[in-house]
Image: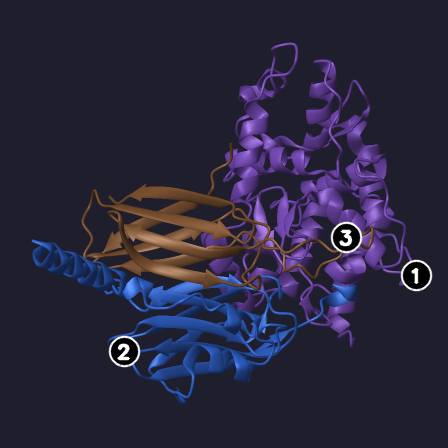
Amino acid sequence: MMKHSRRRFLRGLGVAVALAALPVRLMARATDAFRATKLEDANKALFGQLPLVESDAVNLKIPAIAENGAVVPVTVSTELEGVQAIYIMIDENPNPLSATFELGASSPADVSTRVKMGKSSMVRGLVKTRDQVFYAAQEVKVTIGGCGG
Amino acid sequence: MAADIKLRGKIKDGVAEIKSLMPHPMETGTRREESGDVVPAHYIEEVVCQHNGENVLRAEWGPSISKNPYFAFSVRNVSPGDIISVRWTDNLGESGSGELVLK
Amino acid sequence: MRTPCKRSLLLVAVLLPLFALASPEEDLAAFRAFYESRFPDIELADHADGAYALDEAKRAQWLEMEDFPPYEFAVDEGEALFEMPFADGESYASCFQNEGQGIKHLYPLFDEVAGEVVTLELALNRCREAHGEAPLDYEGEEIAALMAYMAYTSRGQTYDIKVPEAGLGAYEAGKQFFYERRGQLNFACSSCHLQSGGGMLRAEILSASVGHATHWPTYRFKWERVGTLHDRFIECNEQVGAQGLAPQSASYRNLEYFLTYMNNGMVLNGPASRK
């Protein structure tokens, strides 16, 4: 009797573990990465030793000159298959990691938001597949307005 | 009183394109008031999007997302009548959510 | 900035009527003619978009913001405020034509009985006072939200501001203010927005004054909130090192009167977002 219920319990546990491993719960909170003040540290916290490969397959849409550093519209998208997550990084911000987007199987790799930039900076859009990281980067200028803004 | 979130969406070739606008100060925790006091950090940390109750996307944000955040994303395999919901949670434990019935 | 001969001649053509005290209609014709020749490739109506009519890259960013604009929350807040009854049971709707819906383009107007220019902000506070409510702070969030709602219901209306005989003094005072130099930098509104319209001020493009009053209240990204036209007058005056006047002071109301008259024929497109 005990053997049966234990097997059932273990099977139940297995199912529970499998459910928990569904795509949208892959990653633990990226707290360390958000806290990082250097780009390399944020990358290490997110991707470990994985090389970051610059690629035309990643589309980063962001203006070359921001109208206002408080609201810079940005879109990161890609047609690459098997994308698990998208990331936005702003090199010169106090904390370079701006946002992460964990995608389920039915979510196309295409997200848009608006970001704050403290000053002119390189902005990066990164996408992660199971074992690769690709990115696109663009320099964005943030200006002081006329008459002191 | 005010909506926790504004949602708009349309189905295009079987894919829902969803746009959202969330009323939130997104304070970085480094800004000072005129008095000199630092305004404490208060920003959305997590956004979870669901399609008919199933998680489809989970975002983690830092305070460098703009005030009153705008967020657009897509969902495949949708039909009219499906429900898209978005819930945000901030670093102080507050949250807001909204639902959209796709047409 | 180098000023070509033609530009100087045109400026004289615009400014000469000033000294000859032309009629408002003549001023408007000269104003329009100036901007048409300064911006030959731009329709007058498009100047309602300000600097966004003058630069493709800026326009593209602005259109992205306008797709789901940050002032939407202010419009909702304004609607709720507008519909809230006063302590005496009445509401704002009772003070305005058409229950206050779609009427923003009628303001500012010259009140012949009171002998002064009445802006919509002033009218809203007079409505409150008539019903025993304390007036709203002209630089506060509530007045901006109410204005955002009223602009929203008035989108698409065409400006046709009238200057009756009795209002000529106020109109002329507003015009005078527009062309008068002030502050440490000794600039007039016309220095940047007429003489240097379309030019650069550091990284900014100077917008034309024709269409300056159509898109208020405005969500300035810089302010991170909705603000009124008088908020902007104060900011502009302070930016040239002049004293900002009180919002809804007579000088600013007269300036708004002149500027809005110069918008006649243009379409109301507030609330709007700007950098």
Relative to C90, C237 lies left or right: right
Name the mark nearer the viewer: 3 or 2.
Answer: 3
User: Where on the picture, by quarter, is residue A104?
Assistant: bottom left
Q: Is residue C47 visible?
A: no
Q: Which of the image's four quarters has the N terminus of chain C? A: bottom right
Name the mark nearer the viewer: 1 or 2.
Answer: 2
Which residue occupies the foreground of this view, A15 or C48? Answer: A15
Element at label 2: loop
Q: CA distance from mark 1 to mark 3?
A: 28 Å
Q: Which chain contains the residue that carries disc 1?
A: C
Chain B: give its colour.
Answer: brown
Q: Position of residue A48 (x, y in %)?
A: 43, 84
Label 3, on which residue? B33
Residue drawn at x 84%, y 47% is: C177
Q: Position of residue C251 (x, y in %)?
A: 84, 39
- Mark 2 is surrounded, within 10 Å at the Cα level, by few (under 14), some (14 to 19) or many (20 or more) other residues, namely some
Which residue occupies the foreground of this view, B63 or C65? Answer: B63
Chain C: give its colour.
Answer: purple
Label 2, on which residue? A80
Label 1, on which residue? C184
Relative to A8, B59 lies left or right: right
Element at label 1: loop
- Mark 3 is surrounded, within 10 Å at the Cα level, by few (under 14), some (14 to 19) or many (20 or more) other residues, namely few
Chain A: give its colour.
Answer: blue
Residue C256, numbered circle: none
Residue drawn at x 77%, y 62% is: C192
* Mark 2: amino acid: Leu
